[in-house]
Image (cartoon, rainbow, N blue to C red):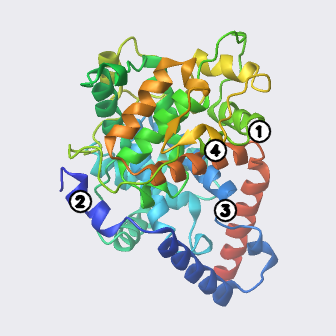
Amino acid sequence: MSANYWTSSQREKWQFTREEIAIARNEINQVEKQMFGDSPALIGCKYDINMRIYLHQLIVKLGRRLNFRQIILSTAEVYLTRFLLRASIKEVNIYLLVATCVYVACKIEEYPQHIRTILSEARNCWPEFIPNDLTRLAEFEFYLIDELECYLVVHHPYNSLIEITQLLKNYGEADCRLDISPEELQSCWSIINDSYILDLHLLFPPHIIAISSLYLTLIMVTDLPGLDTNVTDTKPQKLISNVVSNNSSSNRTVTGNANNNAITNSNENGNSTTNTTSTPGSLTDTSRNVNGQLSDRRRASSSHSSTAQKCLKKGKQSDSSLNKAQLKRGRFSQTSLIQFNPRVEAFIKFLAASNVNLDEIIETVQEMLTLYDSWNYYDEVSVRNAAHSMLLALNRTHNV
């Protein structure tokens, strides 16, 4: 087990380019056509953004019933994403896959559960699709581990986020210092939790995702003067997608030449977890709450700060989008938003001096913005019905 991301199997074996992921998915699509053809019952079930959100919610649902820490669920989601890069979603029982990923993640994160406990709770969630047979879950465990090639250690962005916030607080240059509030830190964690829906953890190092979550929290929904505070809807997908619709160019506010050096050589061992529903009283308290237990996911999605609420109340009235004329080598001009918000200016200066890969941050932010925008159009019923039709068709095929 590697305690350092840079020498870990995650970086050496499970980090890809977008082209490599596209090739792998195209090969899976070809196999699906050969195996299943154009079956009407199967054609509606595909591994798109809607199915990814649905699988994410399945893992959260099972984790909530078992009262698991967030780190276990995040590890399970990484396993699921890796597995579906090697196997077709139409080949497997997705409910059994979710239960197996959670079961294996419990072992790796040193919180082992008896197989009967996982099976029992999974059957309570999805009684029609989880067989009352321990051997089926045990067999799928070996199938999963084989497809993952036994590389099961996962490094998460949570530790990187805490280290970066501490670095910002104690930065050497006074004009780059930034104290991240507990509410903003909680917002970052919610964004990181949602990032597991996408392929970001197959593409970028953990610290890139952590910095991107800070960017979304501090800049995309930044505090503007004179905005109303009476806003109640603070779900992440609602907050940020509203900014996208009101400020179409705001996902291009970070520019500049990329530098391949990492922000830090510190360990990113991913052992920190977050209780996504508690509101910590301080950064130290928040670090302790990382090891807390998972509660209601929907309330976790509503933990964005009041500054974000104020920004979105009058998003159309505030000129928060920054065009290319305001940007030069990754820095805002004097007429840009930062003259109203010194915290944003400090964060931008930190990025300029940190030698992080800005291109990767841009890609990550854009992916998250697309996710939250798509989430507004997500229809759980249609996705669930498509998955159920697929499983019923496969069962009929196997019984023939």
Q: CA distance from mark 2 to mark 3?
A: 29 Å
- Going from N to C along the chain, the mark reached first, 2 or 1, is 2
Residue 69: which quarter of the image? top left
Residue under circle 1?
A: 245
The three-letter amino acid code for the residue at tag 4 is: Lys
Q: Secondary structure at mark 4?
A: helix
Closer to the eye: label 1 or 3: 1
- The residue lying at 65 percent from left, 29 percent from top is 235
Residue under circle 4?
A: 324
State yes or no: discs 2 and 3 in contact (Cβ < 8 Å). Answer: no
Q: CA distance from mark 1 to mark 4?
A: 18 Å
Q: CA distance from mark 2 to mark 1?
A: 39 Å
Q: Secondary structure at mark 1?
A: helix
Q: Secondary structure at mark 2?
A: loop
Above or below: residue 392 compared with residue 365 = below
Above or below: residue 208 compared with residue 26 = above
Residue 175: which quarter of the image? top left
The three-letter amino acid code for the residue at tag 2 is: Ser
- Going from N to C along the chain, the mark reached first, 4 or 3, is 3
The circle on residue 48 is: 3
- Going from N to C along the chain, the mark reached first, 2 or 4, is 2
Q: CA distance from mark 4 to mark 3?
A: 32 Å
Closer to the eye: label 2 or 4: 4
Please state if 267 lies on the left or on the right of 180 as rendered: left
Please state if 357 lies on the left or on the right of 236 as rendered: left
Residue 77 at what x, y percent from top left? 47, 52
